[in-house]
Image (cartoon, grey):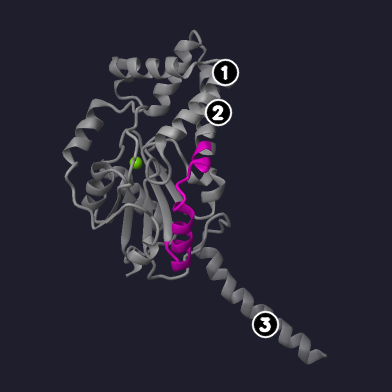
Amino acid sequence: MATCVRAALVCWGLCLLIQVPVHLFCGGNSSFRSLRSSRAAVVTFDLDDTLWPVVEVVEEANQQIARAYDLPADQVMGAMRRLRREPVGESASYTSLRCMAYAELLGGDEATAEEIVKAWVAARNRAGALHLYPDVVPCLEGLASSGAMVGAITNGAGNPSDIPPLADFFHFCVSAEEDTIFPHRKPSPVIFEEALARARALGWSGKTEWWHVGDDLATDVAAASRVGMRTVHVDRPGQTENRFSVSSKEELAARQAGADSEPDLQVSTLKGLAERIAS
Ligand SMILES: [Mg+2]
């Protein structure tokens, strides 16, 4: 009997020895998947028009807010576009511009405008889950099996951590709408460098390949390759043009400048991407 107790204690001790480094490596955050191989790649995704069609997602969020707060979507979009052309909105983040538009339509009620912005972001994330392209989750499952660290680098307000079908697959998300990142939207190297820093903080050695996947040749392909990442351009057939865009003149010019960039991989679907990256 004493031998069994000693054996159990030895086993328990060995388990502790194995588990402690894993816990440290994961930063103790159980919501993130651990990296299973030090040789695994880091793969970051653009979100809008890469994981879901942004027009459908924004339209659905706009309609939900219109119904809940009696704010017609066309009036909100009209106010956002007009404010973008004025000095006050010329270089504002999308979130600030939206907040200004709501406040204006509410007769200057900024507190309610901020509350509605939060509701809009939540509605946008819910719509993202509903409109996910069907190849997204299988692709993320493949990357998880390969042990890759997965992140998001976005200029928009979507966040996979708040989207149930995606949350478990993503280790980090960097958005240009964050106070510490804005106004450094893609294609600025600043947002990509922040992603590199967050991956390092989560245990990335810096010695494995980094792939960035996105639909935009300038803000994803050209910008990511400038900071040394390998790139995947996703060109889905029948992609609708973003009629809700309230991009600034500088952003449109930057996109134009990178419109003829060459990716390392060109795909029309995320199906099989994990295998192609690994090969
Ligand atoms: Mg995109």
Residue lying at the far right of the rendered structure: 1
Q: Which residue is mark 3?
A: 11
Q: Name the residue located 37 percent from the left edge and 60 percent from the top edge.
A: 273
Labels 3, 1: front one: 1
Q: Nearer the viewer, residue 192 or 15?
A: 192
**x, y percentage for residue 255?**
22, 37
Crowding around mark 3 (Cα neighbors within 10 Å: few <14, some 14 to 19, many 20+) is few
- Pointers 1 and 2 in contact (C-beta within 8 Å): yes
The one of 92 and 3 positioned closer to us in this rendering:
92
Looking at the image, can residue 178 be seen? no
Q: Is there any visible trace of residue 65 in the rendered image? A: yes
Tell which circle, 3 or 1, labels the residue nearer the N-terminal end. 3
Q: Under tag 1, what secondary structure?
A: helix
Gap in Å between the C-alphas at discs 3 and 2? Answer: 50 Å
Q: Secondary structure at mark 3?
A: helix
Magenta extent: 127-148
Q: Amino acid at mark 2?
A: Ala
Q: Position of residue 127 (x, y in %)?
A: 51, 37
Which residue is located at x 35 percent, y 27 percent?
243
The residue where tag 1 is placed is 69
Of the residues under marks 3 and 2, which one precedes in the sequence?
3
Is there a contact, CB below 8 Å, between mark 3 and mark 1? Answer: no
Residue positioned 45% across, 21% down in the render: 99
Residue 271 highlighted magenta (yes or no): no
Say whether disc 1 or disc 2 marks the residue closer to the N-terminus: 1
Magenta residues: mostly which secondary structure? Answer: helix
Rounded to the nearest whole Å, what is the CA distance between mark 3 and mark 1?
A: 60 Å
Residue that label 2 marks: 119
Residue 106: give its label. Answer: none
- SS assignment at label 2: helix
Say which amino acid is labelled 1: Tyr
Mark 2 nearby-residue class (10 Å; few <14, some 14–19, many ≥20) = some
